[in-house]
Amino acid sequence: MLTSEVRQALSDALREDRLDEARAVLERETDRMPDAEELVYFQGVLLLAQGQTEEGIAKLKDALSMAQERSNFVFAIAAAARLAQKDPEDINIRLRRTDLYLAMGLVHAAYDYLLREFDFYRRRNDPHALSSIVKKMIDIDKENLDLSLKVAKILAYLEQKDEVRRVVENVIFTLQGQGKYTEAAQIQKEYTKLYEES
Amino acid sequence: MRQEGLDPEGKVELAGLLLQIGFKSEAVTEYLMAAEMYEERGDKEEAVKLYEKILELDKDNQAAKRGLEKLKPRSRKDIDEMVARMGFGAAPDEEPAPEEPSTQEITAPEESETPTPSPPKGEQKVQIPSEPPEHVPPTDISEAPVETQPRAQEPEPGMEEKVAGLASMGIEEFLASLMPLLRHTSEELKERGELAAFFREEGLWSEAFFEERPAYLNKPSVKKLGELLSLLARSDDKDALIGFLLTESFTEREVNLKQEVLEALVTAYEKQGRLEEAKKIREKLATLASQAQKKKKPGVKIIEDVPRLSEEDTHKGKKRPPDPIQFV
């Protein structure tokens, strides 16, 4: 773990484009703590600032994984945000940030983030990404059957019939498990139309 | 972002402005919410007008179609079209829909005004899926990233139509229904504030804005607005800046806060060379200022029923009551 002074010094130097100073601090600290995820993160930021995009992205991905494994969520989210800036199309990195919020117990932030992403990909006309986002919404709380059914409609709009089937059948199965047979029958009657061929 | 505080007239005004600046899907959303509000008020005529306007803008808008279905007599043809648009195919053994079927047959139960009649007891047996649905592992921080999705492809010739289709897809109802999922607890606000502070240090201004916005929405103030605007200015994210300010400009806020928002919006438009929009906002600002001035017009107000203290009470050190004649 970096001391707050070192962290601050690195952040300031990188933000203010004092790259030589940042490099010197990084080299010194890396000798001391070669396996610190925070240093890997700052190395990635430095590489990006130097124009070494590919190497910078690789470092940030390492930093994201390391920080995630070590529950250093703030750095993990920062790494994910920087990666998303560099490669806006990478849905995997973007959705991974949802998991970070959830691991922090920030459920509402996770939904907030997914809606932000939904809007992002809607504007980019990417049905695959949209589909991943709405599936992720369901994954946050599978017991929220209302949400599942709403998402099923969006998936149907995106022509993801297999996913619609999976979601609707899950709802029906859950309701049956709760002994709510009438409701399950009603759902089946109305929603199987979303994925069955006419 | 939904503007829950606006009345339907305000939403229609917002929608008009959004349309002028090319935010078609956002305008549709505002029209839709206004139509629903008119409907709740019992003003069916206005609601129908708005639903029809929405369909002029977005002929495939499911929510508007559904709204019209409720308010206008329907023909079988209309219903078939709507069902087709919603992606519902007829179930293999389903009876043909009656001439005037209930909307319940094509809407989700949670959106129906009245529950769909249950089938007769003997027919309540549900066809159980052949096996339990595929288990989706819970979200776990230690898991591998989500499944790889194909990358979005570069727009192809003729793609505009599809872009417009997705950008204006009928998700208004869906998004509106998710709003309760965004209500943050105080603990969550605190944690997001800490994230925002970190992003500030890192110079990730857009991300800092995103993390700080819930605190502002929870308790709006001029100070917090200034902080958010400062972040957006640093991020140079013009779309986010205009989107946020425009949304705020039509949200019910205290006068001084609203003025700050409008002034910032004027500046943002002027910086982008969008002088017509800036002019309109200036007019709105002037109207707001004159309204505020009227409220502050000096005068004399007589306060009745002010308890009177005797001289004796005053000598004992009791606090004097307010003067019954006050300049306001």
Image (tube, rainbow, N blue to C red):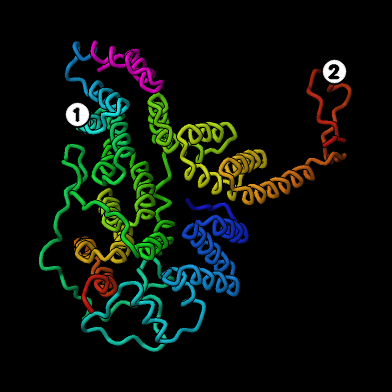
The magenta stretch spans residue A110: no
Q: Quadrant of residue B263?
A: top right
x and y percent of residue A52 in the render?
26, 29
Q: Is residue B321 above or below residue B139?
A: above
Q: Residues within 10 Å of mark 2 (few under 14, many from 20)?
A: few
- B257 displayed left or right of A86: right
x and y percent of residue B73 in the render?
49, 84
Assess whether mark 1 and mark 2 are in contact (beta carbons under 8 angstroms). Answer: no
Please tell me which residue lies in front, B266 or B27.
Answer: B266
Between disc 2 and disc 1, the foreground one is 1
Q: Residue placed farthest to the front in the image?
A: B157
Bounds of the magenta span?
A1-28
The residue where tag 2 is placed is B315
- A48 displayed left or right of B295: left
Q: Main secondary structure of the magenta part?
A: helix
Type of amino acid under label 2: His
Q: Residue placed farthest to the left in the image?
A: B131
**Camera sees residue A138:** no
Quarter in which the C terminus of chain B is drawn = top right
In percent of the image, x 21 and y 84: which residue is there? B93
Q: Secondary structure at mark 2?
A: helix
Please tell me which residue lies in front, B315 or A47.
Answer: A47
The residue where tag 1 is placed is A66
x and y percent of residue B62 in the render?
41, 70
Q: Are marks 2 and 1 on the same chain?
A: no
Cα distance between the residues tagged 2 and 1: 74 Å
Mark linked to residue A141: none
